[in-house]
Amino acid sequence: MAIGILRSWGGRAVIGVVNLVVLAACSAGSTVGSSSGTPNLSAAGSPSAPQSPDETVKQDALAAYLGMWKDFVDAGTTSDWQSPKLGQHATGVALTNLSRGLYADHSNGLVTKGQPALHPMVSSVEPVGDPKKIIVSDCGDSTAWLKYRADGNQVADNNPGGRQKINAVVEKQADGSWKVSDFGVHGVGTC
């Protein structure tokens, strides 16, 4: 079942089609702009402990997901819809939607300041044993990620942001890297 989603995440239009419905879980999260750029994976074990190939792949997929949002946040400070960084962690529909959202902000003279708080977790791995597709569920919080006019004045927004369910598809690329190929952001209060 395909779900088309057109929602505003803290005032940023984000369009996505996700070919699944997954439950979002809110766990200890990270902020996109954190210095490490990697999720807090308490279940991953200590760095010296050997990890299964599936655990390594899950970490790679979560890193791609967080990297996509970090790239989007960075580009949003100037609404740079042509930023080459956007393609580092996103491809396909995801990349198109990120660029379109930034283009709309650019056209409307808007920039974004602050950081969203993200709480991603892997909800499925397909196929098990030789993953090619990872489904990531998140409960993102856009409360501290706000829109401003390019001249510095904050845009009045009837929707000040909040916690929103996010579903993302992260796929293994031909070069072995992982990129977000699709995502959907649900309305405020969905997690």
Image: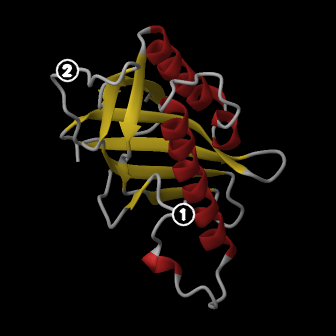
Q: Viewed as shown, does residue 186 lie left or right of 62? A: left
Which residue was labeled with disc 2?
Answer: 156
Q: Position of residue 187 (x, y in %)?
A: 25, 32
Mark 1 to mark 2 CA distance (whole Å): 32 Å
Q: Mark 1 is on which residue type?
A: Thr
- The 10 Å Cα crowd at callout 2, few under 14, some 14 to 19, many 20 or more, is few
Q: Position of residue 62 (x, y in %)?
A: 54, 57
Disc 2 is placed on an element classified as loop
Which residue was labeled with disc 1?
Answer: 38
Query: Does 57 appear above or below 151?
Result: below
Q: Earlier in the sequence, mark 1 or mark 2?
A: 1
Q: Which of the two discs, 1 and 2, sits closer to the camera?
A: 2
Which residue occupies the foreground of this view, 134 or 83?
A: 83
Mark carried by residue 83: none
Residue 3: which quarter of the image?
top left
Q: Viewed as shown, does residue 175 lie left or right of 78? A: right
Q: Mark 2 is on which residue type?
A: Ala
